[in-house]
Amino acid sequence: MRSRAFLVMLVVAGIVSGCSGNDVLAPVTQPNSPTLISITVAGSLSLLSGQTSQMSATANYAKGTTQNITSQATWSSANPAVATVSATGLVTGVSAGIAEIRAAYQNVTGSLQMTVNKPTSFTLSGTVTETPPRTSTPVVGARVEILNGDNHGKYTLTDASGQYHLTNLVPGSFNVRASMSGYQNTTWPITVSSDQTLSFLLNPTPQQISETFAGSIGAGDPAGSCGSPCKTFAIAIHNTGALQATLSWGSAADAHLLLQLFDADANRVLAQSPLTPSDTSTSTSETVSVNITTAANYELRVVGWQITRATSFTVTTTHIN
């Protein structure tokens, strides 16, 4: 029995010895992963309730390397009644107080303490009137609106005196626009950190008015016996703005005509088309352009000379005010 057992042990030992060659796979050694030691949370330390602020999270490793993990971290607020935080790290102030904003990653957590303040409100007021020369004319019912920033969308309308009041504004910088049908919009930037005053001047939307006037000049002065140009036609002009007038007639052989803008109060010519009584031009069209800046007793005159026979003419005016 002993010899048989000994023989079995020799066989087993031989089998083990035959399997101990190069066919046995050595264990694979995994490279060491960097060790995460801390997470840094960065962003605003304070904000107003209702405002938002984007946080960032940075992973700090043992060998001095860092990695932005803002989108990979798990975000949370220790006091969501004061501030909440989204899955991407966007914090929203809810009410006044202190909240700890946390970012967790691979069982490591970093945090930032944030203070949420109750906003202090202010009032923006002023007037909306027309541009000169009618600056005393209030624009009633004009819309005054905040275009951007934390007060975006707030608006009010001017009263019968052209006054407006925008209340409960949080501090900040933004653009304010005044608008009204029939006027060109006006926008101004402003920074509000206390009660402020901001007034607007609105330009009326330019209106183009075109008119045509027909007239005639009679015969009877072939030798120029009147001695000086004779006024034949007058068109009253009462509005301010840019004025262009064109005079046309049939033939220079029948008459020579020109246009004048005349100030009847001052008894003087303000502007005149190029043709003059001394010219022998064969032109049958004359144009005068002028910018009338003040309302006065003006008139557009057609003046004729060297009139050989009855001559019809037309005056076309284009007025932009």
Image (spheres, helix red, strand yellow):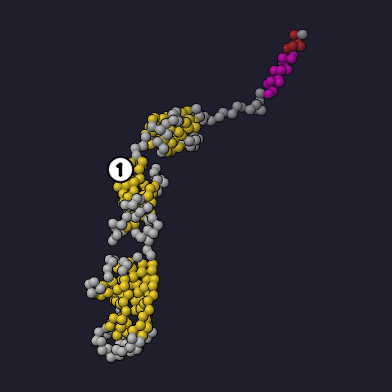
Expressed as whole percent of the image width and height from the top left, the position of residue 183 reads: 37, 58
Image quadrant in which you'd find residue 275: bottom left
Work out which residue is located at the far front of the displayed protein and give it. Answer: 160
Residue visible at 38% across and 32% down in the picture: 96
Q: Does the magenta stretch include residue 8?
A: yes
- Start-end of magenta stretch: 7-19
Of residues 284 and 207, the one drawn nearer to the viewer in this rendering: 207
Expressed as whole percent of the image width and height from the top left, the position of residue 238 reads: 31, 69
Looking at the rendered image, the quarter that the C terminus falls into is: bottom left
Question: Secondary structure beneath disc 1?
Answer: loop
Work out which residue is located at the far top of the displayed protein and give it. Answer: 1
Q: Is the magenta stretch mostly helix, strand or loop?
A: helix
In the image, residue 225 above or below residue 87: below
Expressed as whole percent of the image width and height from the top left, the position of residue 310 reads: 35, 87
Of residues 104 and 255, the one drawn nearer to the viewer in this rendering: 255
In the image, residue 191 above or below residue 91: below
Left or right, residue 180 beside residue 35 = left
Residue visible at 36% across and 85% down in the picture: 311
Expressed as whole percent of the image width and height from the top left, the position of residue 28 reads: 59, 29
Residue under label 1: 195
In the image, residue 97 above or below residue 248: above
Q: Is residue 265 magenta?
A: no
Q: What residue type is labelled 1?
A: Asp
Left or right, residue 53 beside residue 72 = left
Residue visible at 68% across and 24% down in the picture: 19
Image quadrant in which you'd find residue 319: bottom left
Residue visible at 33% across and 84% down in the picture: 217
Left or right, residue 311 beside residue 278 = right
Of residues 26 and 117, the one drawn nearer to the viewer in this rendering: 117
